[in-house]
Image (spheres, grey):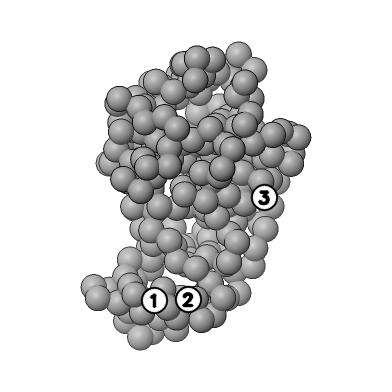
Amino acid sequence: MIKLVLLDVDGTITDPGRLISLRAIEAIRKVQNDGVIVSLASGNVIPVMYGVKTFVGVKAPVFAENGGAMFQNDNITPFFSMDMPKRLFEKLESEEKLKGILSNKWRLTSMAYVPVEGHQAEITSEAESEGLVTVDSGFSWHLLNRGQDKGFALEKLKEIYSLDYDEILVMGDSYNDAPMFKKDVVKAVPANAEESLKTIADHITKEGNGDGVAEILLNLRSL
Ligand code: CA
C-alpha cells in the first residue's frame, strides 16, 4: 500500500509553461485528507517551494535544489554546501561558458545555469573533475554536489516516516528525477516524461503533466 507520494514540480504538477495544474492540486489535497503523505522535490529554490507548499497545502517536508535543502515547520535545512558549486559556477561564468538564472539569488547548496552553446560537455567534465555533478531538469541545468539529488530527498523521507521502498510512489518527468526512481519504489511518469524515464517506470499515465498526476493519485489503491 502506498503511504507516501514524492512528486516533481515543473513539468509534473505544472504544464510546460509552468502553470500549476488545478486537477493536481485537488488530487494532492484529496489523498492527503485520506491519510497519504505527499511531498515535493524540485530543482527550484526554497522560497519557491515555501510558496508551493503553503498555497497548495502540502503538509510533509518539501525539498528544493534537487534534494539539497528541505523546508518544514518554518525551518530550512541545507544538507550540502554551496562552496564548490559556487566557485566552479563563477569560474565558468567568467569564461563565458554558461549563464546564471534568476533563482540563483536564493540558492543555498547549488547553482543553476543555461550553458552557452557547445559548452555543456566541457562544463560536465570540469564539474566531474571537481567532484561535482551536472543535471538537466528540462527547465535549466544544475551544478550540484555529488550525492545531491532527488534520491537523497527520497532517503530522507523514508527515514523520517520509517517507510519501506514499496510504500513510496515517486513521479517525475525528467533526467533529474531518475535518482528517485529506485529499485523497489513504485515509479510513475506523466505522458510527457523523457523516454529514458518511461523505460524504467511502472506506470505511464495516459495524460500529461498535472492531469497525469491526478490520474495516478486518484487511483493509488488500485496500482
Ligand atoms: Ca520536472
Of residue 213 and residue 198, the one placed in the foreground of this image is: 198
* Badge 2 vs badge 1, beta-carbon distance below 8 Å: yes
Disc 2 Cβ-to-ligand 1 distance below 8 Å:
no
Residue that mark 2 sits on: 127
Residue type at mark 3? Ile
Q: In which quadrant will I find the N terminus?
A: top right
Q: Is residue 42 above or below residue 135?
A: above
Residue type at mark 2? Ala
Residue at image coords 59%, 56%: 68
Q: Name the secondary structure under disc 1.
A: helix
Q: Position of residue 13 (x, y in %)?
A: 40, 33
Residue type at mark 1? Ile
Q: Is residue 49 above or below residue 222?
A: below
Q: Marks 2 and 1, how far apart in space? A: 6 Å
The label on residue 76 is: 3
Disc 1 Cβ-to-ligand 1 distance below 8 Å:
no
> Badge 1: how crowded within 10 Å, few (<14), some, or many (20+)?
many
The label on residue 123 is: 1
Residue at image coords 53%, 32%: 186
Q: Position of residue 76 (x, y in %)?
A: 67, 50
Q: How many marks?
A: 3
- Comparing labels 3 and 1, the label whose residue is closer to the camera: 1
Q: Name the secondary structure under disc 3.
A: strand
